[in-house]
Image: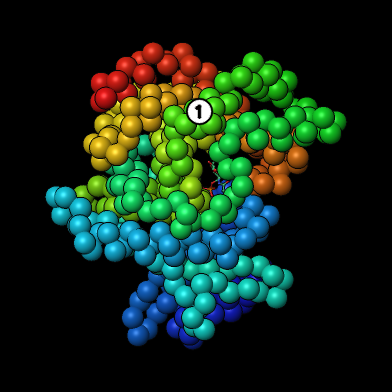
Amino acid sequence: MTMNDLFRIAGEFRPVDTIADVRPYGAGNINRTFLVTCGAPETERFILQRINSHVFPRPDLVMKNIRVFTAHASRKLRAEPLSGNRRWVVPEIVPTLRGEDAFLDDDGGCWRALSFVGHAIAHDILKTPEHAREIGTGLGIFHSLVSDLPCADLSDTLEGFHITPRYLEQFDKALASGRRMDFAGFSHAVRFVETRREFAGVLEKARADGRLSLRPIHGDPKVNNIMLDETSGRAVSMIDLDTVKPGLVQYDIGDCLRSGCNPLGEETEEWELVQFDTAMAREILQGYLGEARRFLTDDDMSFIADSARLIAFELGLRFLTDHIHGNIYFKADFPGRNLHRALVQFRLCESIEEQMGEIADIVRSYA
Ligand code: GN1
Ligand code: MG
């Protein structure tokens, strides 16, 4: 894709002669993301993305969910502003000049634009305990904003997302295909999965037993999807709305914990050194439960520790399966990248297992 193509596509959203710059942006594993700057008469920035249609087969429904969410959250924020005058920004869809939610290019690629959250910053790794608390608060505010949005208003845009037993089935099929990406660490990773098969069903079983129920979730609440105000350092927005859809809040809580409490970050190649930082988990949970405790049930609370363990395991399993498939889902900059990522998540999962009692105690202290 040339610069010319990118300017032309950005020009579907704003008059092409006002576009001053288009540059690659962010660290997403799935979509292609660009920051577009428009010059005169007024400077404006927006995020331009090509939705990965291998991952999201119905980009139109992804956009519909985003529209339902943003309308609901904005209406709610106008009616009940957040306490303490906290600034909270809901990213808005920037329609094409023809008034559509997305632009289809000649190859069928689906491009969409979202407003840029200004005066805000995101980090890949938690910096301080205050940062951790704000990440938790941000997720809590998000869940609070959608707590009265009916699931029926949202489509299932990514079937099977976070249903761990389905990822196990996909892993089994991949392994059975005989395709072996037998790099160092591969057999360790396969053994790791084998010894946790039963645990993989923990949240889905609780759902089947009626102990947990579906609610709107964010789906990808990793640390760098929660923006902080540049000046105050307080959480100010949750970005990356592609996976807003019905799910279990535990998927979000677990994902936020596994992403926030891994000080080496998910891209580290020193997987053996990975540790789950329980002190950071305490801060995240304090921030989160300060916002969300009032609409969580006791059952919801009792699965929080398991959810951190499960989502670390699940993400490792997803990376490992994609490694066997030859890196077709998660972008990879070298052939063993997704195996490394899997080993990081498995080591994190193990570290969570070693500290399960302590994590459960933290949750109980907020019960
Ligand atoms: C993907 O879009 P991105 O890169 O933030 C993935 C998440 C994973 C994450 C791990 C739709 O998120 O589930 O947790 O990578 N998103 C999808 O970095 O699969
Ligand atoms: Mg995402």
Of residue 169 and residue 327, the one placed in the foreground of this image is 169
Q: Position of residue 117 (x, y in %)?
A: 35, 61
Residue 54 as seen in the image, left or right of residue 357: right
Residue where numbered disc 1 is placed:
209
Q: At 41% across and 32% down in the image, what residue appears?
A: 257
**Disc 1: CA contacts within 10 A as few (<14), some (14-19) or many (>=20):** few
Task: Provide residue 77's location: percent of width, then percent of height.
Answer: 25, 59
Q: Quadrant of the N terminus?
A: bottom right
For this view, does 303 lie left or right of residue 283? right
* Amino acid at dot 1: Asp
10 on left or right of 83: right
In the figure, 90 relative to 277: above or below?
A: below
Q: Give residue 341's quadrant in the image.
A: top right
Residue, x 54% and y 60% (percent of image)?
A: 62
| Residue 320 screen position, x and y as percent | 67, 32
Which SS class for mark 1?
loop
Q: Residue furthest front?
A: 210
How far across and how far down the image is residue 7, in percent? 56, 76
Tell me the quarter of the image containing the C terminus.
top left
Residue closer to the observer: 95 or 169: 169
Tell me the quadrant of ligand 1: top right
Q: Residue at x 30, y 47 (%)?
A: 144
